[in-house]
Amino acid sequence: MAKVLVVTSGKGGVGKTTSTAALGAALAQSGQRVAVVDFDVGLRNLDLVMGAERRVVFDLINVVQGVAKLSQALIRDKRLDTLWLLPASQTRDKDALTEQGVGSVIKEMRAKFDWVICDSPAGIERGATLAMRFADEAVIVTNPEVSSVRDSDRIIGLLDSKTERAERGQRIEKHILITRYDAQRAARGEMLNINDVLDILSTPLLGIIPESEEVLRASNIGSPVTLSNAGSAPARAYADAARRLRGDDVPMIIPAERRRFFDKLFGRRAA
Amino acid sequence: MNVLNFFRRRGSAPVARERLQILLSHERAARGQRDLLALLREEILAAIAKHVTVESENVHVRMDRGDTVSTLEIDVEIPHSAGMLLAAGS
């Protein structure tokens, strides 16, 4: 049975698009049929992060408005043949998305895919509420930083009240994905640690993605990090998170704190 | 200097944690609060309207949540003519 997953956060720049691409690719690598859908109308970027920016012909709004068929707008990934992208429109504005239209596109996609992953725009406006509207599960991307945690809390409130499942009295499964985690800074008490974030948000953890230059490198070359360097720390963390989404029991590894000998000795702060 | 710093600074994360906990407890309370206040406002207005004529926009209901005590503030503006009646009745 297909699962519709929204990747959301409230706050911008925390890694929603990176996480959508990485989780989508990891799920597709395990043989699942996956579609990633960009809901950021007017500011699309999932196509760029996936390396498909020159292959966009039709987009979500064309499908919602009946100008193009879903099959015409879906772009098949060149590396993984079970991974597809439905891009957002770059020229239209978000008012072109209607709830009914999005609902019927999602319904059609449920029949074709195992996973439909909706990449939400930042904020709590129409694009974000429509991205979460038909979701069965939610990944809330959070940085260990006060404004991100506060916005995540707000989004959790919206997931529990404004989604179709919530309105029908059903539970929407929610997971926290902590990104840009710096174990050294957390160990020194300079950054909220994992338990701080989970205690405050009282939502289960899906994974911890360590801060890494590999993430920027992956977006530079237009490849999900799980494909560009599968052995890197963030790629392995995303792959584990994807397995947890599928229901596997994967032990959670908190990124190791590697302090140099002299830092340990003098309690020195790294640059 | 380094040693002094080491003892003085315990990192800013505990401050972040505490600020967030306080802020979010207020914001979460406020989420459910709007509906409760709308309901209270409606019922208070109905109770008053049985005895005095008041305009609905002249009834203000406000709630302040404190750490130990919360206060409910009800402000009803009664038109002059009705006010005279109330005074006469008492």
Image (cartoon, rainbow, N blue to C red):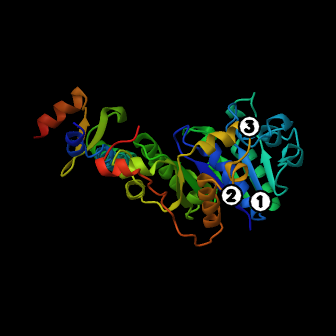
Name the residue that disc number 3 marks.
A48
Marks 3 and 1 sit apart, C-alpha to C-alpha, by 25 Å
Label 1 is placed on what type of residue? Arg
Residue A93 higher or lower than A206, as above or below: above
| 3 and 1 marks in contact (CB < 8 Å) | no
Residue B46 higher or lower than A42, as above or below: below
In percent of width and height, residue A73 lies at 85, 43
Q: Which mark is residue A4?
A: 2
Label 2 is placed on what type of residue? Val
| Left or right of B83 in this view: B56 | right
Q: Chain of mark 2?
A: A
In percent of width and height, residue A80 lies at 82, 55
Name which quarter of the figure residue B15 lies in. top left
Name the residue that disc number 1 marks.
A110
Give the camera-side residue of A261 and A215.
A261
Q: Residue lying furthest left in this view?
A: B90
Give the secondary structure at mark 3. Answer: helix
Give the secondary structure at mark 1. Answer: helix
